[in-house]
Image (tube, rainbow, N blue to C red):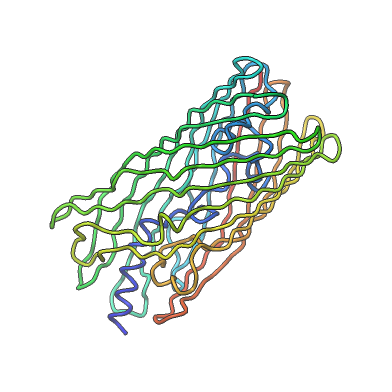
Amino acid sequence: MKKKSIAAAVSAGLCSVALSAHATNGDQMFATSAAQAGMGGATVAQAQDALTVLVNPAGMADLGMQEVRMDLGFGLLNPPREVNGQDSDSNWYLMPGGAVAFKVNERLFLGMGLGGIAGMGVNVPDILPAVTGNQPVVTTKQVFRFSPAAAFKVNQALTLGAALNVVNQTLAMSLPGGGGNYVTLPQNGQFGLGATLGATYKINPRLQAGLTYTTKTDVATMEYNTPTGQTSFDMDMPASLALGLSFKPMPGLQVEFDIKRYAFEDVMESIAVTNPPAGFPPALNFGWEDQTVYAIGVKKDMGKMAVSVGYNYGKSPIGAEDVNMNLGSTAIVESHLSFGLTRKFSDKVSGAFAYTHAFGNDLTSSVAPYNTIEINQNQYNFNVSYLF
């Protein structure tokens, strides 16, 4: 039993490297701004701000600007989580984000956006309290994206957009390993490239559709110098496909429904490890499955003020059979409820705030040892916008 528990400790620590992202849909942030969060992430068809560059670049054509729109802000993420009843000590994370979009002419729009799209860390003092001694897991993961983009209005109904995704991923960890070893991989960062293709189509004055596809981001091999040589493995970002439909039943009221599919299985089902150090397995068999996310948002514009409410749901990409290989993961959050508020301070300047609560969820392994992971989440987003 003790050997099984130690093996579970190794799994937990290793998984923390890949899955310490306290994001909401798997390891992906569902929103990068207050306006997006207030809609529950339902922003594929109708752009809410310039940060549409990171979601659907075609949305730049719908921002209503004469020359430029800028959005700058940050989010605070509070994800209390437990492993076998042990709390993680780090519970607050900063998520910056910003974007700018330019109207070149009536058909061409250019922009760029940047923000944290996944990451954070785990800091659990002892994931196996029943085993003699402490089994701490301390990890850090951050994924930051920069995306230059362009959108072109083919006609009054159809707009096409594209963005180049430049990603920087950093990983570090310290964790218990097999044979009494303690594995430490120092902070390391690698870049990756991908792309997002998007479109919006005005079906009629009240109904608009949006479609966006983000390719898999091919991140360079993560390499770590250890006493036994160089350890390396590939950890890429998943491809995704999203479809949205926005409806305006009356002036000032918008309802949007989105469906998004993340191809987690391609990048998180099993990851081979080259030259693993002592106590480190030859493969990280996380067992993630693809995830389908549903989001709905309602927004009411009342002149100088607008309020929104959103709901976002995505079934956990890991099942009970994979818990022991995902003890460090917080990817089991499923249901989220959001509230947003936007206030115009002038014709050009406005501010936005959103609060999201991810309802608590726990998952216990279906095979021995019967470990349990648990998490709930609070997220606060603040943004200032300039429109001219």
Residue 288 position in % (x across, y down): 45, 62
Which residue occupies 68% across, 45% down?
A: 39
Q: Is residue 43 above or below residue 317?
A: above
- Comparing 219 with 67, the one in front is 219
Residue 67 lies left or right of residue 254; in this view the side is left
209 on left or right of 223: right
Quarter holding residue 252: top right
Q: Quadrant of residue 251?
A: top right
In the rendered image, which quarter contains the C terminus?
top right
Residue 268 locus on image (x, y percent): 41, 58
Residue 88 location (% of width, % of height):
43, 62
Pick the residue in front: 322 or 331. 322
Count of marks placed on residues: 0
Q: Residue at x 54, y 36 (%)?
A: 197
Which image quarter holds the N terminus? bottom left
From the viewer's perspective, is residue 68 above or below residue 261? above
> Camera-side residue: 351 or 308?
308
Q: Horizontal placement of 62 versus 285: left or right? A: right
Quarter of the image where one finds residue 123: bottom left
- In the rendered image, residue 379, in percent from the top left (x then y), is placed at 58, 50
Q: Is 366 left or right of 243, judged from the image as shown? A: left
